[in-house]
Image: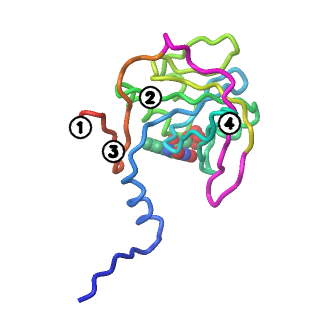
């Protein structure tokens, strides 16, 4: 009997298949009316070194993105394996989540989460609408200094679960 290697492309199957792509976890943050906000984001990737461009996708239903977009500035915070609670907190909508993290002070007023593996301060370069998401391109304006970088390991997301490099 001939075996089928094809699966239907429905949302559930696609989510299951894409869950086999392991990645780090970031929090995209911004400061809206002096209040830090943000959301957990797995879809971050680098686009270009010269000029320095990065990208992520955000759901059209995101509550925090419209405010961050309006400032045309955001920070990408790359989480360490000790920061799963921060990922969980920012994976929910609502204003309370910003009270659950320590924010680092930055002269420009950006929202930077303390003790991450690294951060990138970005200006909004462009935004494109695709399906149920916006694809956002950011231009890196500042980045974490070498002595910021915690030597820890990344928080990893794989098959719908958090993992670390040891597991
Ligand atoms: C591990 C993980 C990865 C996520 N990655 C993304 C992502 O890449 N883009 C996105 O829009 N939402 C992503 N989310 C979902 C958002 O974090 C979640 O919808 C959050 O509630 C959005 O907050 P907001 O509505 O306040 O913006 C992810 C959630 C988790 C747990």
Ligand 1 within 8 Å of the CB at mark 1: no
Asked if residue 91 lies in the magenta stretch, the reply is no
Q: In the depicted view, which residue is nearer to us: 42 or 138?
A: 138
Whole-angstrom CA distance, mark 3 to mark 4, is 27 Å
From the top left corner, tell me how far across and down residue 123 is, in percent. 72, 30
Discs 3, 4 touching: Cβ within 8 Å: no
Q: Residues within 10 Å of mark 4 (few under 14, many from 20)?
A: many
Q: Residues within 10 Å of mark 3 (few under 14, many from 20)?
A: few
- In the image, taking residue 115 as reference, residue 111 lies left or right, namely right
From the top left corner, tell me how far across and down residue 81 is, in percent. 35, 28
Discs 3, 2 touching: Cβ within 8 Å: no
Determine which residue is flagged by label 2.
Answer: 79
Mark 1 residue element: loop
Q: Tell me which label, 1 or 2, sits earlier in the chain.
A: 2
Whole-angstrom CA distance, mark 4 to mark 1, is 32 Å
Determine which residue is flagged by label 1.
Answer: 167
Q: Tell me which label, 4 or 1, sits earlier in the chain.
A: 4
Mark 4 residue element: strand
Q: Tell me which label, 2 or 4, sits earlier in the chain.
A: 2
> Number of callouts in the render?
4
Q: Which residues are magenta?
A: 127-148
Say which mark, if any, is on residue 161: 3
């Amino acid at each position: 009997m001939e075996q089928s290697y094809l699966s239907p492309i429905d949302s559930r199957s696609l989510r299951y298949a894409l869950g086999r792509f392991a990645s780090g976890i970031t929090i995209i943050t911004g400061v809206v009316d002096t209040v830090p906000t943000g959301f957990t984001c797995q879809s971050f990737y680098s686009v270009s070194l010269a000029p320095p461009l990065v990208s992520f996708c955000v759901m059209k239903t995101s509550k925090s993105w419209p405010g961050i977009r309006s400032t045309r500035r955001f920070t990408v915070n790359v989480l360490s394996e000790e920061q799963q609670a921060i990922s969980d907190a920012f994976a929910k909508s609502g204003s309370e989540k910003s009270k659950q993290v320590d924010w680092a002070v930055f002269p420009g007023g950006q929202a930077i989460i303390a003790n991450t593996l690294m951060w990138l301060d970005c200006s909004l370069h462009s935004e494109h609408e695709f399906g149920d998401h916006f694809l956002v391109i950011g231009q890196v304006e500042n980045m974490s200094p070498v002595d910021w970088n915690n030597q820890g390991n990344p928080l990893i997301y794989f098959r719908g679960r958090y993992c670390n490099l040891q597991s």
